[in-house]
Amino acid sequence: MPTLRPRARLLHTIGTELISSETVAVVELVKNAYDADANGVVLCFSGELGEGQGELAVLDDGSGMTADTVTGI
């Protein structure tokens, strides 16, 4: 199975201190979707599934956060 290699922006966003591996990052994204009251989560792979290639999108129908929640207002 190929290793997932997230982009630098994603690693910065989720925090390298909090996420110990690419696998943990994907699990956290799925858990976050359910925390946002999602009824379903879909993992979509595209492109080549070799090391350093392809993409993974985590799609959900959760409610998300408001801008005020994100900015802490």
Image (spheres, rainbow, N blue to C red):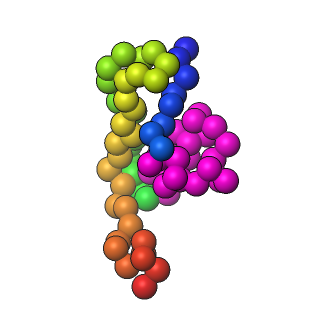
Answer left or right for 66 relative to 72: left
Q: What stretch is highlighted in magenta?
A: 9-35
Residue for point 48% across, 37% down: 6
Is 4 placed above or below 12 here? Answer: above
- Determine which quarter of the picture holds residue 65: bottom left
Residue lying furthest front in this view?
8
Is 22 placed above or below 37 here? Answer: above
Nearer to us in this view, 46 or 59: 46
The answer to whether residue 47 is seen in the rendering is: yes
On whether residue 11 falls in the magenta region, the answer is yes
Nearer to us in this view, 56 or 27: 56
The answer to whether residue 27 is seen in the rendering is: no
- Determine which quarter of the picture holds residue 24: top right
Q: Where is residue 38 in the image (x, y as percent from the top left)?
A: 39, 51
Is 2 placed above or below 71 here? Answer: above
Answer left or right for 53 relative to 16: left
On whether residue 33 falls in the magenta region, the answer is yes
Nearer to us in this view, 62 or 43: 43
Quadrant containing the C terminus in the rendered view: bottom left
Q: Position of residue 63 (x, y in %)?
A: 34, 61
Residue for point 32% across, 24% down: 46
Residue for point 37% across, 61% down: 64
| Magenta segment, prevailing SS (helix, strand or loop) | helix
Q: Position of residue 50 (x, y in %)?
A: 45, 15
Q: Position of residue 42 (x, y in %)?
A: 37, 35
Residue lying furthest bottom in this view?
73
